[in-house]
Image (cartoon, rainbow, N blue to C red):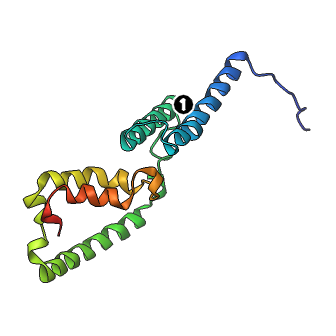
Amino acid sequence: MGTPDIQIDLPMASRAAKAARVLEILLLFGLLPVLLAFRWLRAPLMPLLWLTALYCAWRLYLDGKLNARWLGAGQVGPGEWRRILATFALLTPVLLATVWAVRPRALFALPLHHPLGWLAVMALYPPLSACPRNSSSGCSSSTATASCSATGNGWR
């Protein structure tokens, strides 16, 4: 026996929350990118991206939707981890030996001669690698070249 279709009106609080969520989406994914694309908002891109990401994570946390399984931690099985670690264990010595044989002075040149530059690469590479690669985003290849050359000539 089927249940009858019942239409329930949402309370005003739920309607207001839904309207606030729609406004939030329009601001974050509509207005903000347009302001940045037309350069009507003069703000450093990477701090703005970090703040936006932190805000989104905070909202997911408040909604109870931010957990390890949602972030993908539950998708890698024990066999997969063994394969990843085996690949790392086999390729790391091969890569080290290749660099040592071809250019031994370059092996640890960056952390030895430019530790702050090395720390900057370690800290900034993950977020910058996700940055769009078109010229209107502010993360063009000339920007990357300028930032790399500013750290010194240990890169060559």
From this view, report whether residue 92 is shown above or below residue 98.
Answer: above
- Front residue of this view, candidates 114 and 94: 114
From this view, report whether residue 117 is shown above or below residue 28.
Answer: below
Other residues around mark 1 within 10 Å, as few (<14) / some (14–19) / many (≥20): few
From this view, report whether residue 152 is shown above or below residue 38.
Answer: below
Residue 99 coordinates in the image, percent (x, y): 17, 77
Residue at the spot 19% in from the left edge and 81% down from the top edge: 98
Left or right of 67 in this view: 87:
left
Q: Which residue is mark 1?
A: 63
Residue at the spot 60% in from the left edge and 35% down from the top edge: 25
Judged from this view, the residue extending furthest toward the top is 12
Callout 1: helix, strand or loop?
helix
- Front residue of this view, candidates 24 and 6: 24
* Amino acid marked by disc 1: Asp
Residue at the spot 44% in from the left edge and 59% down from the top edge: 133
- Quadrant in which the C terminus is drawn: bottom left
Left or right of 97 in this view: 136:
right
- Residue 3 lies in quadrant: top right
Residue 44 coordinates in the image, percent (x, y): 37, 40
Residue 76 coordinates in the image, percent (x, y): 45, 59
Number of marks in the rendered image: 1
- Residue 142 lies in quadrant: bottom left
Residue 43 coordinates in the image, percent (x, y): 40, 37
- Front residue of this view, candidates 135 and 78: 135
- Quadrant in which the N terminus is drawn: top right
- Front residue of this view, candidates 54 and 38: 38
Residue at the spot 45% in from the left edge and 56% down from the top edge: 135
